[in-house]
Image (cartoon, grey):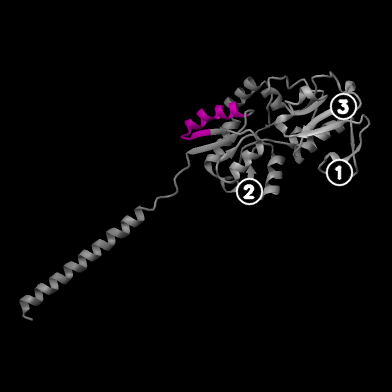
Amino acid sequence: MNGKKWGIAVCLCMSLLVAAGCGGSTAGKETKSAAPGAAKKTEITIACAETTQALVAAVVPLMAEKGYKVSYKVFDNNKNTLVAANDGSMDAVMVVHRPFMEMFNKAGNGDLVMLQPYLYTVGMGLYSEKHKSIDQLPEGATIALMNDAMNMDRALRILADAGLITFKDKTDKASLIDIATNPRKLKFKDMDQTQTVRALPDVDASIVFFSHMRNANKDFKSFLARDKHPENYPQGVVVKAKNENEPWAKDLVRAFRSEKVRKFATEHYGGLYEYIK
């Protein structure tokens, strides 16, 4: 190969190497820039019930001010709200109390947590459309109460505190089989918690959540007796455990606890929700 041809070959090789080097460098830069950080979650779905729908709706504009788009779906069964959150169909739940959520986790291998600080408590009471006091409940009176274990325990304790029944020794979570004495020979009808308010015309008395009474346009303050320790049943925002520390979850709690939403809750629900300080 003469000198002229050799020079051309060397120049061609160097050009190819330079081009390849430049191409590799550009590709590396493009790959690095194409791997953005995790985007902030801005769309949130909340599972609720008729009883909490207005409260959730009040949070929507506050979250919008922070750049979130919040939508919600109303369920007719509280357990189904937890199922939807647990399987990822919904991001959060706003309707159940903590022991109910814990019972769901234990029974169904759930992975849900209630975010702190908690929001409020909702009372439960013994109501009657036939009798004006506990003393007027006749022998053999029929009482409606919840059929899920957690709320049945809470309901039976209202009856026990009112002196209508007693429990066997060392009773933890009370059920009908744990009743030791029943002087008035009360009869019990257990049913879904949403049905207890509808059962009022057909029974002597019924154990009902304050929220279900209000939702049925009944006076939730007209109870014959009520639970003594509602603080044991706090309610709050429920999410998957993996989302416990996500910014959107914390912002959601702040919105529910804001003075604006508290004021709305007081005015709209008439003291139904007893906020936890």
The kind of residue on which mark 2 rests is Asp
Quadrant that contains the C terminus: top right
Task: Pick the residue in front: 238 or 249.
Answer: 238
Q: What is the C-alpha distance between the residues marked 2 and 1?
A: 28 Å
Above or below, 262 against 102 in this view is above
Above or below, 65 against 132 in this view is below
The secondary element bearing badge 3 is classed as loop
Q: What percent of the width, then of the height, locates residue 223?
A: 79, 23
Q: Identify the main secondary structure in magenta.
A: helix
Task: Pick the residue in front: 164 or 161.
Answer: 164
Q: Which residue is mark 3?
A: 141
Q: Which residue is mark 1?
A: 171
Which residue is pictured at 27% across the width and 58% down the height? 26
Magenta part of the chain: 52-71
Residue 118 visible somewhere in the drawing:
no
Task: Locate residue 268: give its quadrant.
Answer: top right
